[in-house]
Amino acid sequence: DYPAGLTVTEFADDLGGGKQCLGFVAVADLKANPKLRFNAVHLPQQKTPSRIHAEFASANRGTACVTINAGYWWAGNSLSLLVTGGAGFIGSHLCERLLGEGNDVICIDNYFTGHKSNIRHLLSHPNFEIIRHDIVYPYMAEVEEIYNLACPASPIYYQHDPVKTTQTSVIGAMNMLGMARYNRAKVLQASTSEVYGDPLVHPQTEDYWGHVNPLGLRSCYDEGKRCAESLFMSYYREHGIPVKIIRIFNTYGPKMDINDGRVVSNFIVQALRGDNITIYGDGGQSRSFQYIDDLIEGMVRMMDDTPDDFTGPVNIGNPNEFTIAELAREVISLTGSKSKKIGR
Ligand code: NAD
Ligand code: UDP
C-alpha cells in the first residue's frame, strides 16, 4: 500500500502506533531494486510476516524477493502472557505472534522436543523471556493469559517415556491451572484430535466422546490429554477459572522437527534427500493438514475473541481430506524430486 523507497521512520510515523498497526514487513524485489529500497506493507493482525511473504512471492513469481520483519509499533493493551512448550514447533510460532501484538511473553520449556534454534531470533526482543523449566514441577508468575502447549506431540517422542508423557499432561495441567487460579488468568489447553482415539465417527465433531484404548501404546498421550481436559472443566466449574480447550488436528509448517516421524516432514525430507518415499499401506488412508498460521489464528481468537464462559472444546483443523498417496505425489511434484514411492 506504500510507495517504494519509504524510509522506516516515515512508515512508522504514518502508522501512528494505533492498536491495529502492530508492526510491518518490508518487502524488496532484489532484481528490480538491488539497493534494497523497501516496499513497506501493513502487517494486519491476522497475517504473519511469513504469510505476507508467501502472498508477495506468489503474486510476483520469478522475482527474487525477501521479506524482512523490520520492527514493531504498538500502543497500550499489552498483556503478560505465558506459553508452555514455547520452544516447540507450534509454541515458537505462537510466541512470535503474541510478541508481534506487543505483549510480554514468558516462554517455559524443558527442551525435551523443542529447540533453542526455534526461538533464538526472539531472544533479543525486549518483551521476551525464556525459562528452562519442566511443567511437572510448580512454577508461578504474574500473568494474565496462559497457553499450555508443553507435551511431546509425536508418537516416537511421547512413547519414549510414557509415564513422563502422562505426568506432563496431567500434573503439568494442574500446575498451570493452579497458576491461573492464583492470577485469575485465562488458560488455554492445547488438546488433540487423539482424544477421539480410533474414532468410529467421521468427521469427528466436538460432541463425539471418542473410542479410546486405555491400554494401548498411545494411551499415555491420549488418556493424558483427556484427563487434562477433565481437569480444565473441573477448574472452570469449581473455581470459575476462564478455560479454553482446543483440539488440534494435524498441522504442518516451518520448524516442524525433521525427525519426528510424521508424514509431512518424512515425505518432504525424503524427497529433498532423493530417498524413497515411504507410504505405509496402500496410501489410500486420508488425512487433512492445516497450515501453522491458520492454527495460530484459531488459538489466539479462541483465547481473546470468545466470552469467558465459552470453554470449548473447539476442533481446529482443515475439513478437506486427501490421501497419503496424493500427498506423496504433491511433495514429489513440488520438490521436483527423483524419489520413488514405495509401499511398506
Ligand atoms: P513439539 O514437540 O514441537 O513441542 C512441545 C514442546 O513442549 C517442546 O518444546 C518440548 O520441549 C516442550 N515440553 C515437553 N514436555 C515438557 C515439560 N514437561 N515441561 C516443559 N516443556 C515441555 O510439539 P508441537 O507439535 O509444537 O505440539 C504442541 C502442543 O500441541 C502439544 O501439546 C501437542 O499435544 C499439541 N498438538 C500438536 C499437534 C500437531 O500436529 N503438531 C496436533 C495435536 C495436538
Ligand atoms: N505415513 C506414511 N509414511 C510415513 C509416515 C506416515 O504413509 O512415512 C502415514 C501413516 O501410516 C498415517 C498417515 O501417514 O496413515 C499420517 O501419519 P502421521 O503419523 O503423520 O499422523 P497421524 O497418524 O497421527 O494422523
Image (tube, helix red, strand yellow):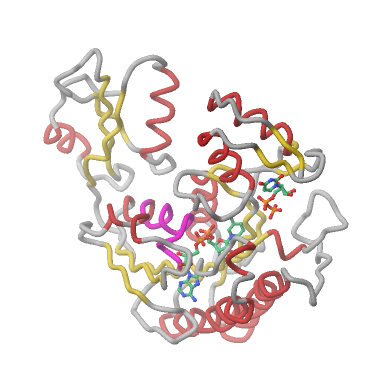
**Pick the front one: 267 or 114:** 267
Q: Residue at x 59, y 45 (%)?
A: 266
**Pick the front one: 13 or 24:** 24
**Pick the front one: 246 or 341:** 341
The mark tally for this picture is 0
Asked where in the image residue 274 lies, by quadrant, the reply is top right
Q: Which residues are magenta?
A: 85-96
Prevalent SS, magenta region: helix
Quarter occupied by the C terminus:
top right
Residue 63's x, y, as percent?
A: 34, 16
Position of 7 relative to 131 (above/below) = above
Does the magenta segment cover residue 92? yes
Does the magenta segment cover residue 242? no
Give the left or right position of residue 107, taking residue 177 as reference: left
Q: Residue at x 49, y 44 (%)?
A: 293
Residue 199's x, y, as percent?
A: 83, 58
Give the left or right position of residue 95, taking residue 307 as reference: left
Position of 63 relative to 76 (above/below) = above
Give the left or right position of residue 6, taking residue 159 as reference: left
Residue at the farthest right position = 200
Asked where in the image residue 35 lies, by quadrant, the reply is top left
Q: Residue at x 24, y 12 (%)?
A: 32
Residue 228's x, y, as percent?
A: 63, 76
Residue 333's x, y, as percent?
A: 60, 24
Quarter occupied by the N terminus:
top left
Q: Residue at x 71, y 31 (%)?
A: 326
